[in-house]
Image (tube, rainbow, N blue to C red):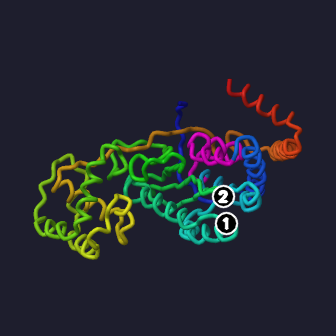
Amino acid sequence: MRRGIANLPLHYGKAPPWLFSRMVRLSKAILDLMVLEYGRDAVLKRLSDPFWFQSLGCVLGFDWHSSGLTTTVCGALKEALKDIGPDLGIFMAGGKGKIALSTPDQIRNIAERHAVEGEGLIEISRLTAKVDSVLLQDGYQIYHHTIVFTQDGKWAVIQQGMNESLRMARRYHWLGTNLKSFVEEPHSGISADRIHERILLDLTARISSGARDSIRELLSQPQYLLKELEKVKVLDLPRRHYITHKDLNVKKLRETVAKLEEGTVRTFEDVLKIRGLGPKMMRALTLVSELIYGARPSFEDPARYTFAHGGKDGHPFPVQRDVYDVTIETLKRAIAKAKVGEREKVEAIKRLSRILNE
């Protein structure tokens, strides 16, 4: 596996219109050619790869080493798929900030127009967002969420969180194909500038399985948990513990648990669906379950992928508009010829790719 470092500092502002319009046009050509050559499932697989996604941003001309690469590239892909998505059978929903909140409505609109099973995808969208904000508490608050899906319901998710105090961002990639669990090491990759020595909580780690089982067991028996909460008066926490007394709001936890019905929590995914269950309450449940069952969660940072290239504001060099436009036209002609059986240019592009990778 290739390794490197990518800095994703927070930057504000937007890509200039002249660049974004070209990014959309080139995105159309790349997506069209990829589906033609490899099929639409390959598009999802590549988008779920942090290295490939970062490279795509550079190919599109957005060589910023910043958080803006994620939001701008996803925006360009979404605009491109609005036009060619129905023909390719690939669609995209979500976005940044308030737009992300409308993801369920966007999925429903696409589902109604193109005969896609939307409700399952909405559940997946909500679950992946909940995992990266509640189960994985690494100090980066999710503010960008996109889901890419195909006509037959396969999917990938790209979301990004920010750490305002560090002025850094972190990107989370998911791929639905062969996903074994939503709650245990589910990511296809996490790209980050910094891997922290410790984080608040990672219940997605394999070594947190005991903690997840304990929490699920407690919530499947709400009356038992309520009785145990009455006993929690004084906590004697070991020095190594990163969850503190401040995380345990017994009153709020009791109010939430009291609303649960026996038997409604059977899997850990059911835990995530509990209304009102946020990051702080999950830390409280983790603490209580450890006190009762002794199952310790992980506090290690799960980020494994880091990168480094590019700069912004014309560094390492300004985007060459004429070269960019020629690239778009070359790909468009290659696609047109490939569709009518003339594959010489497509084969030439593939040979060039092999040479560059030697």
Contact, CB < 8 Å: mark 1 with mark 2? yes
Secondary structure state at the residue bearing disc 1: loop
Position of 248 compared to 64: left or right?
left
- Residue 16 spot, x, y in % from top left: 72, 57
Q: If you read the primary sequence from the N terminus, does the residue marked by circle 1 or circle 2 appear first? A: 1
The one of 331 and 15 positioned closer to us in this rendering: 331
Residue 308 forms part of the magenta stretch: no
Q: Which residues are magenta?
A: 40-68
Give the residue drawn at x 44%, y 43%: 303
Give the residue drawn at x 22%, y 57%: 287
- Residue 161 spot, x, y in % from top left: 48, 56
Q: Is residue 39 visible?
A: yes
Disc 1 residue crowd, few under 14, some 14–19, many 20+, Cα 10 Å: few
Q: Main secondary structure of the magenta part?
A: helix
Q: Is residue 126 above or below residue 45?
A: below
- Residue 329 spot, x, y in % from top left: 86, 46
Which quadrant of the rendered structure holds the C terminus? top right
Q: Is residue 322 visible?
A: no
Q: Which mark is residue 301?
A: none
Give the residue drawn at x 28%, y 73%: 261
The one of 15 and 21 positioned closer to us in this rendering: 21
Q: Which residue is mark 2?
A: 151
Q: Which residue is mark 1?
A: 115
Q: Amino acid at mark 2?
A: Gln
Disc 2 residue crowd, few under 14, some 14–19, many 20+, Cα 10 Å: some
Secondary structure state at the residue bearing disc 2: loop
Position of 52 compared to 257: left or right?
right
